[in-house]
Image (cartoon, helix red, strand yellow):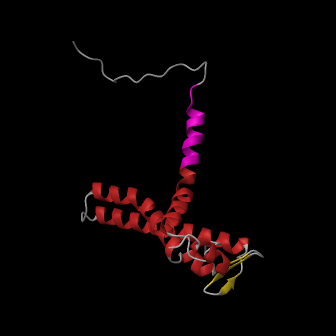
Amino acid sequence: MSANYGSYIRAKTYDPAGGTYRNGVPMQQASPTRRWWARILDALFALVSTGLIIGLALALSAANVISLDAATGACLISYPLMVLVFGALYGCAVSPGQALCGVVSLQVDHGRRVGFWRGMGRYLAVGFFPIAITVIIWAFFDAPTIDSVPIKVFRRTSQVR
């Protein structure tokens, strides 16, 4: 690639008046309502898919088809896996929420899709944000104060010597 490749692409696909071109066609920016509905629908699809995997794993465990350990592993890995799958769809192809709302996320300069790693990074950040906030709030309320009494853990039975 030549050193001027990026400037050539920007000159061909980016309009400073506020539009991005994709395949020679100017794209209009989607309304905030459509963007939020696409995000909400993607979150619902990820949660429903996670619920289906968890339900299937627990049903198979109850029917003694798989062990309880395997079902627990499937339950624990299903949410991060669905977040990664939907992030990859968002970055490389089209996520279900975007398809239903008729929106697409593109790089402004190039008119290309967001990309695999960037899409997965966005979905991981958004998918685990509520968990991070919950842990921070929990740590804040559970933090010891100056006048609190120290806590120690003891055995229930005394040792016989």
Q: Going by the picture, which residue comes out furthest to the right?
A: 17
User: Horizontally, is 62 left or right of 76 in the view?
Assistant: left
Residue at the image position 57 percent from the left and 52 percent from the top: 130
Q: Magenta stretch: give its range.
A: 132-144
Q: Is residue 25 above or below residue 40?
A: below
Q: Which residue is drawn at 60% across and 86% down?
A: 23
Query: Taking 12 as reference, is 71 left or right?
Result: left
Residue 69 sits in quarter: bottom left
Q: Where is residue 139 in the image (x, y as percent from the top left)?
A: 55, 36
Q: Is residue 89 visible?
A: yes
Q: Is residue 106 above or below residue 80?
A: below
Q: Residue at 61% of width from left, 77% of height from top?
A: 9
Quadrant for residue 79, please give it.
Answer: bottom left
> 151 or 121: which is nearer to us?
121
Q: Which image quadrant is residue 16 in?
A: bottom right
Residue drawn at x 61%, y 20% is 146
